[in-house]
Amino acid sequence: MVRTSMHAAGRHDYEDYISLLPDCVIHHIFFLPTEDVIKTCLLSRRWRYVWTTISDLRGHYWSPLLYNCCSLTKLCLRGCRFSSSESVSDDVLRMILMGSPVLEYFNLIRCQGVKRIHSRSLRELVIDDVLVMEFTLEISTPCVLLLHVRGDYFREMIRIIEAPSLVNAELDFDSQVKSDYSLLKQMLCKLQNATQILLGDWCLRVMWPWKVENVQVSLPNCKSLMLHIPFRQYSFPAIANMLATTPNLEKLIIIFEPSDWCDQWVYSLNSNPQV
């Protein structure tokens, strides 16, 4: 009888250790990779939805359970492949964003096949080294304040559909898309309310051949402008054109980082006047 009572008491105590933990303690346990955090839903009935109340998820793992994260404010996805031909379709990302109504920070790192990012709750969107190949990446984020797009893997272009609240914009990417001023003009027009702007490779390569008087874009609210220039030979026309677009500029920062690839691109452009 004593052994039975002790065994029952031990089992009861063991069960209480998990079931009686307050949410604030459980949230500390959730400083784990996303896939491990989601697996905790199998521990008990009480833990089934507790993980959805945390504010920060990071990892390269996705699950249908991500479609309902009512308290999630920060999300970082790394190395995910979104494609209609793969098991993870573009609809997955759409459903994740729809299921996160208070999501404020979203970071995509080295993901592939992203076609659209639509969210009315986002305040910060950071896109790092995302592979844009077959489709234009559309961004529609009416409440976003910060947009950073960085990388060298844009075989197609990004298109900012809606970002009227944008204050801090960083477009430091390269693309194999043919230099098209109309695309750049559409992009810059979406930055009219931004006060801090950083522009990189593709934007400046498209800008430098134009004459100052033909630049038909104005960024009246831009106070701080940073130019990340990978080539020296044709940098000054690009700088002059960007200064023409920012009549109220207060601070200009220029970063030169020349590369062999950019020199080859400029040589090719000179050899083919039709480009």
Image (cartoon, helix red, strand yellow):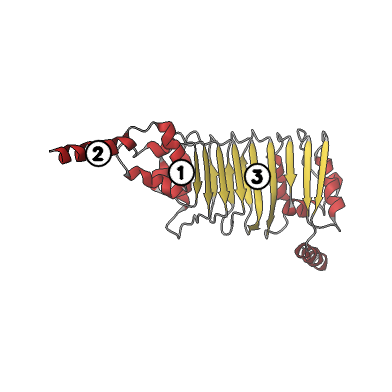
- For label 2, the residue is 10
Quarter placement of the C terminus:
bottom right
Disc 1: CA contacts within 10 A as few (<14), some (14-19) or many (>=20): many
Furthest toward the front, the residue is 2
The residue that appears at 68% across and 60% down in the rendered structure is: 176
Left-right relation of 192 to 248: left
Type of the residue with mark 1: Ile
Question: What amino acid does circle 2 point to?
Answer: Gly
Which residue is the site of mark 1? 96
* 257 up-or-down from 21: above or below: below
Disc 3 element: strand
How many numbered discs sit on the rendered protein? 3
Measured as percent of width and height from the top left, residue 254 is found at 82, 47
Of the numbered discs 2 and 1, the one sitting upstream in the chain is 2
Quick check: marks 2 and 3 in contact, CB under 8 Å? Answer: no
The reply to whether residue 99 is in sight is no
Question: What is the C-alpha distance between the residues marked 2 and 1?
Answer: 41 Å
Label 2 sits on a secondary structure element that is helix
Q: Which mark is residue 106?
A: none
> For residue 140, which quarter of the picture?
top right
